[in-house]
């Protein structure tokens, strides 16, 4: 049975779900947040230690301002409401991506990270303003600045995910098969599951089924 330490998720399909069911993309994001909560609970149940969620990419800035504002309001309210509870559940929150939001949101994110920094039950890496290409370019710049050799070990030190094991399982919902600039280095050997359901429709049972299937796969890592 494969060990499962890290699940990464591209939570795609909120906009389509919202338009179809409530005639509003933003309603889809709101519904998507409920799925986030369900999946966090199920991740803990399965004793998985790292969960990385792609919430906002460097490319998502191209969306209408109104949608961007809605997403960050949703995040802000979620953290204000839930950070105490996450902390009580011994969940650590880490942001990956550059925190260049409003000063209010930046400080809330920093506060939430600090508050939960000692927690060990589950680490949630929330990818916000994250892009793998930017991450890799920054890492190479650091290597150059510090006159270090270019090798895997040195490069990893400068990734947003330093000290985090690579994802074992990558899930993308929303019936689309692409990586969208997410963790390009880190998913080199991840098992990738594409799910037809839109993120708000994805549920604990779908997730558990994937985990079960993942456990039974023969992972070779280049060997035979
Ligand atoms: C992709 O669906 C989803 C996002 C860009 C945002 C993800 C946000 C959430 C799941 C809710 C908020 C989460 C937190 C942690 C506050 P899409 O909008 O690209 O969907 P589409 O492909 O149907 O347009």
Image: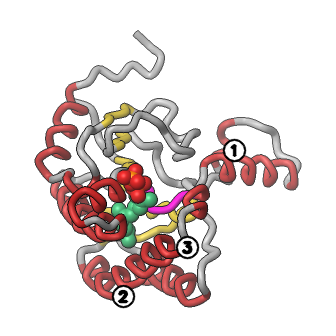
- Which residue is located at x 36 percent, y 69 percent? 26
Assign the C terminus to one quadrant of the image: top left
Query: What span is colored magenta in the figure?
Result: 53-57
SS at circle 3: helix
Assign the N terminus to one quadrant of the image: top left
User: Do the numbered discs 1 and 2 sit on residues whose CB atoms are within 8 Å?
Assistant: no
Judging depth in this view, the residue of 111 and 79 nearest the camera is 79
What label sits on residue 80 in the rendered view?
2
- Residue 85 lies within the magenta run: no
Q: Is mark 2 within 8 Å of ligand 1?
A: no
SS at circle 1: helix
Judging depth in this view, the residue of 83 and 115 nearest the camera is 83
Which of label 1 and label 3 is nearer to you? 3
Find disc 1 in the rendering and name its residue. Answer: 155
Above or below, 221 against 139 in this view is above
- Which residue is located at x 27 percent, y 49 percent? 198
Q: How far apart in space, not on screen, are marks 1 and 3 (Cα)?
A: 35 Å
Q: How far apart in space, not on screen, are marks 3 and 2 (Cα)?
A: 22 Å
View extreme (front): residue: 23
Left or right, 165 with reference to 123: right
Colour scheme employed for the rendering of this structure = secondary structure
């Amino acid at each position: 049975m494969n060990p499962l330490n890290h699940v990464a998720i591209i939570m795609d399909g909120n906009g389509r779900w919202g338009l179809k069911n409530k005639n509003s993309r933003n309603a889809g994001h709101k519904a998507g947040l409920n799925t986030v909560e369900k999946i966090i609970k199920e991740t803990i149940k399965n004793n998985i230690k790292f969960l990385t969620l792609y919430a906002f990419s460097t490319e998502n800035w191209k969306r209408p301002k109104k949608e961007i504002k809605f997403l960050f309001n949703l995040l802000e309210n979620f953290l204000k409401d839930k950070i105490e509870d996450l902390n009580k559940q011994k969940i650590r929150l880490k942001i990956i991506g550059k925190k260049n939001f409003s000063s209010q949101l930046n400080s809330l994110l920093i506060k939430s990270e600090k508050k939960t920094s000692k927690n060990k039950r589950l680490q949630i890496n929330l990818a916000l303003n994250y892009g793998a290409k930017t991450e890799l370019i920054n890492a190479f710049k650091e290597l150059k600045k510090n006159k270090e050799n270019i090798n895997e070990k040195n490069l990893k030190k400068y990734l947003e995910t330093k000290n985090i094991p690579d994802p074992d399982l990558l899930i993308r919902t929303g019936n689309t098969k692409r990586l969208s600039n997410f963790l390009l280095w880190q998913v080199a050997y991840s098992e990738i599951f594409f799910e037809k359901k839109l993120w708000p429709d994805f549920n604990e049972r779908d997730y558990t089924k994937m985990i079960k299937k993942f456990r039974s796969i023969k992972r070779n890592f280049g060997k035979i």
